[in-house]
Image (cartoon, grey):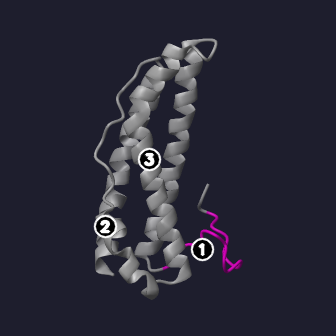
Amino acid sequence: MNQIIEELESNFHEIHQKKDHIKKIISNLNQNKILPGQSVDFITTFYKSYLKDLYPYLSGKERNSLHVIYQYFNLTDKMMKSFESDILNFLSLKIMKTSNEVYQMFARRFTELLTMLENAENLIARHLEKNPVDVFYADRQEKPENLK
């Protein structure tokens, strides 16, 4: 169980770096510029390789919360990796009226990504406090007010 906690702690610290990079991407997009999104992926080794062994020992709240956290990581890494080619494709296809619309669409997407990472931070903090959030409201008693 310690390994998943250590992996969460490492990723908790990496979130701050990802958010900083995303803020720079958004700033560039607001100036109609492209800053590549490539960055170091979140650490998922323990989750991908050993979670199945821990599964019987985790509560439903823990399993569900970990699932959401790691999905946020996966989506973030995928979006950051594909960003440059995605935006260049949109610009070359001229689907939108102006290139500025394309830049603003991607800026909104990255703003949503920031929100996801803030949610991941909150979920990780609760795991580290040994009080995971009931993300799917299985208990129906707890509503995660700190999630956006």
> Which of pointers 2 and 1 lies earlier in the amino acid sequence?
2
The quarter holding residue 140 reads bottom right
Nearer to us in this view, 144 or 87? 87
Say how many tags the image has.
Answer: 3
The quarter holding residue 108 reads top right
Residue 7, visible in the rendered structure: yes
Residue on which the image places disc 2: 7
Which quadrant of the rendered structure holds the N terminus?
bottom left
Seen in the picture, residue 91 relative to 118 is either above or below; the reply is: above
Q: Amino acid at mark 1?
A: Asp
The residue that appears at 55% across and 78% down in the rendered structure is 61
Which quadrant of the rendered structure holds the C terminus?
bottom right
Q: Estimate how packed mark 2 is, as few (under 14), some (14 to 19) or many (20 or more) residues with alpha carbons within 10 Å.
A: some
Instruction: Between label 3 and label 1, give the one nearer the viewer.
Output: 3
Q: Estimate how packed mark 3 is, as few (under 14), some (14 to 19) or many (20 or more) residues with alpha carbons within 10 Å.
A: many
The residue that appears at 55% across and 42% down in the rendered structure is 112
**Magenta stretch secondary structure, dominant:** loop
SS for callout 3: helix
Residue on which the image places disc 1: 134
Query: Mark 3 and mark 1: span between their CA atoms?
Result: 22 Å
Query: Mark 3 and mark 2: span between their CA atoms?
Result: 17 Å
Tag on residue 76?
A: 3
Q: Amino acid at mark 2?
A: Glu
User: What range of the chain is rendered magenta?
Assistant: 131-145
Seen in the picture, residue 135 relative to 73 is either above or below; the reply is: below
Q: Estimate how packed mark 1 is, as few (under 14), some (14 to 19) or many (20 or more) residues with alpha carbons within 10 Å.
A: many
> Which of pointers 3 and 1 lies earlier in the amino acid sequence?
3
Residue 53 part of the magenta-drawn span: no
